[in-house]
């Protein structure tokens, strides 16, 4: 991360909060977990009073997902949660990260609470605890109630208040057993892939108005963190898909700085400094609007996180604008940086099946710089790889490419720890092959294969490798 006011700068680090959590792993050794998300695995989208989410609506549009499929069934984890908790336990991880589906709890976004939804998460949490696995919850992994989207979604301030109310309802029910919480997962995707590029739900192309969504997401985080802290929680974090920005030769520094501003600093600035920096305001003048960013908003967000989750898959390499090569799809993030000088995103080899560059050094750099910037405990809340899984021996997928990816990224995490980064945990993405958002079921990240017809779960070779590694740890 270079150029101007980059996210690796040490200014304003929240050292007063470092180590203040009470239930996060203590960092003596690297804790391991597995991660999942509600819409990607639960299915049962029409059961027990669940309302529509923006992903139900978006996936129903022709061409919105690569295979035309949605999360109606997914991995059927709504009914098979105990089996999945057992898979996590047998893997040997100490933690299971799940997300709560807002439409299951408050189907209309605000108002009446659906207790059958809370009952489901009660069962899931207890199933984990009974098997010796600590559950950690995320309140928002992109499944906004459609009713709220119909009123403007994250472009509207009321959604942030509604989110905090919903989070408090969930915490009141589960907080006696779930003690580590994340408010948001990857707000960059929710704001900029959802409201600028239009490639994720709700599929809108609002240009610079997507910066409104970014602010309201962080306001929602701040309001929810305040509510949970008032309820006694001391382990409230936020999960960000920060990225190392490695400009290609010839890219003007201003363009690289703009990419970093929208990808990284729009979140870290409010969290650490309680401010949007000048480089960000250059590309996102919307964030200078006093009607959007009201008095007290940034002060509320500053210092609101007790820990930070880092989701990492690949570095970001912006370069000078060039035509898209024949036969290659336009990079899906091209329009996800409104206000930034035009760039082309370069992806070097080797690549995963989803087309992302494999570069463990990016994770190491990101962890070191994020700790320097925030002073907060860090958890690698997602890291993993999609591969085609073409090699099968005796009914078991021999995913050596995925095993190698995990091995090298775990090593990068350990190197970051050795360099002084306060990294407490590493969570593999993901336990199960699942619904991979706009890719549908065409890309598989799981260390457990899921048969789409029978829903049978079969651990892959990567699962067995990690199981053996953890057994010997």
Image (cartoon, helix red, strand yellow):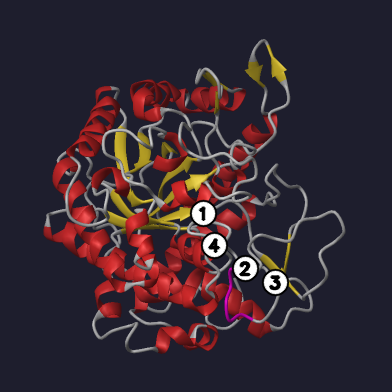
Q: Which residues are magenta?
A: 335-340
Q: Residue at coordinates 77% horizontally, 75% vertically from top-left?
A: 321
N-term-proximal mark, 3 vs 4: 4
N-term-proximal mark, 4 vs 1: 4
Asked if the residue under mark 2 is in contact with the one under mark 4, i.e. CB atoms within 8 Å, the reply is no
* Disc 1/disc 2 C-alpha distance (Å): 18 Å
Q: Secondary structure at mark 1?
A: helix
**Residue under pointer 3:** 247
**Residue under pointer 1:** 416
Q: Is residue 155 above or below residue 400?
A: below
Observer-side mark, 1 or 3, equals: 3
Asked if the residue under mark 2 is in contact with the one under mark 3, i.e. CB atoms within 8 Å, the reply is yes
Q: Secondary structure at mark 2?
A: loop
* Disc 3/disc 4 C-alpha distance (Å): 21 Å
**Residue under pointer 2:** 245
- Looking at the figure, which quarter contains the N terminus? bottom right
* Disc 4/disc 1 C-alpha distance (Å): 29 Å
State left or right for residue 223 relative to residue 409. Answer: left
């Amino acid at each position: 991360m270079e150029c101007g006011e980059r996210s690796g700068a040490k200014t304003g680090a929240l050292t007063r909060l470092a180590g203040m959590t009470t239930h996060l792993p203590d960092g003596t050794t690297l804790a391991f977990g597995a991660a999942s998300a509600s819409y990607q695995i639960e299915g049962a989208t029409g059961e027990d009073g669940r309302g529509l989410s923006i992903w139900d609506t978006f996936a129903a549009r022709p061409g919105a997902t690569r295979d035309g499929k949605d999360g109606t069934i997914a991995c059927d984890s709504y009914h098979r949660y105990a089996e999945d908790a057992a898979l996590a336990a047998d893997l040997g991880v100490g933690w299971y990260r799940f997300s709560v589906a807002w439409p299951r709890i408050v189907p209309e976004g605000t108002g009446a609470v659906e207790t059958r939804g809370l009952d489901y998460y009660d069962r899931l949490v207890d199933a984990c605890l009974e098997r010796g696995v600590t559950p950690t919850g995320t309140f928002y992994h992109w499944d906004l109630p459609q009713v709220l989207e119909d009123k403007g979604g994250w472009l509207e301030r009321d959604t942030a208040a509604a989110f905090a109310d919903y989070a408090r309802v969930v915490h009141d029910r589960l907080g006696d057993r779930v003690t580590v919480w994340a408010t948001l997962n990857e707000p960059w995707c929710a704001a900029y892939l959802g409201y600028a590029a239009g490639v994720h739900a709700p599929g809108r192309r609002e240009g610079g108005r997507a910066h409104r969504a970014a602010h309201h997401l962080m306001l929602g985080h701040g309001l929810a963190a305040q509510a949970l802290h008032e309820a006694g929680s001391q382990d409230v974090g936020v999960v960000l898909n920060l990225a190392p920005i490695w400009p290609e030769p010839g890219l003007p520094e201003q363009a690289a700085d703009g990419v970093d501003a929208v990808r990284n600093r729009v979140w870290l600035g409010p969290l650490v400094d309680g401010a949007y920096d000048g480089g960000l305001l250059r590309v996102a003048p919307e964030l200078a609007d006093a009607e959007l960013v009201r008095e007290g908003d940034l002060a509320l967000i500053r210092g609101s996180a007790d820990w930070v989750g880092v989701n990492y898959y690949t570095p970001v390499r912006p370069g000078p604008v060039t035509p898209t090569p024949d036969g290659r799809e336009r990079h899906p993030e091209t329009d996800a940086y409104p206000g930034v000088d035009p760039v082309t995103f370069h992806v070097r080899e080797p690549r995963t099946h989803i087309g992302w560059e494999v570069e463990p050094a990016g994770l190491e750099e990101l962890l070191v710089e994020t700790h320097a910037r925030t002073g907060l405990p860090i958890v690698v809340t997602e890291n993993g790889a999609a591969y085609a899984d073409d090699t099968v021996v005796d009914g078991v997928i021999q995913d050596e490419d995925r095993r190698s990816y995990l091995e090298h990224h775990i090593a990068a995490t350990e190197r970051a720890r050795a360099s002084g980064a306060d990294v407490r945990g590493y969570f593999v993405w993901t336990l199960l092959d699942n619904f991979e958002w706009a890719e549908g079921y065409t890309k598989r990240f799981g260390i457990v294969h899921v048969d789409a017809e029978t829903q049978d779960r079969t651990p892959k070779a990567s699962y067995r490798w990690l199981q053996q590694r953890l057994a010997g740890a």
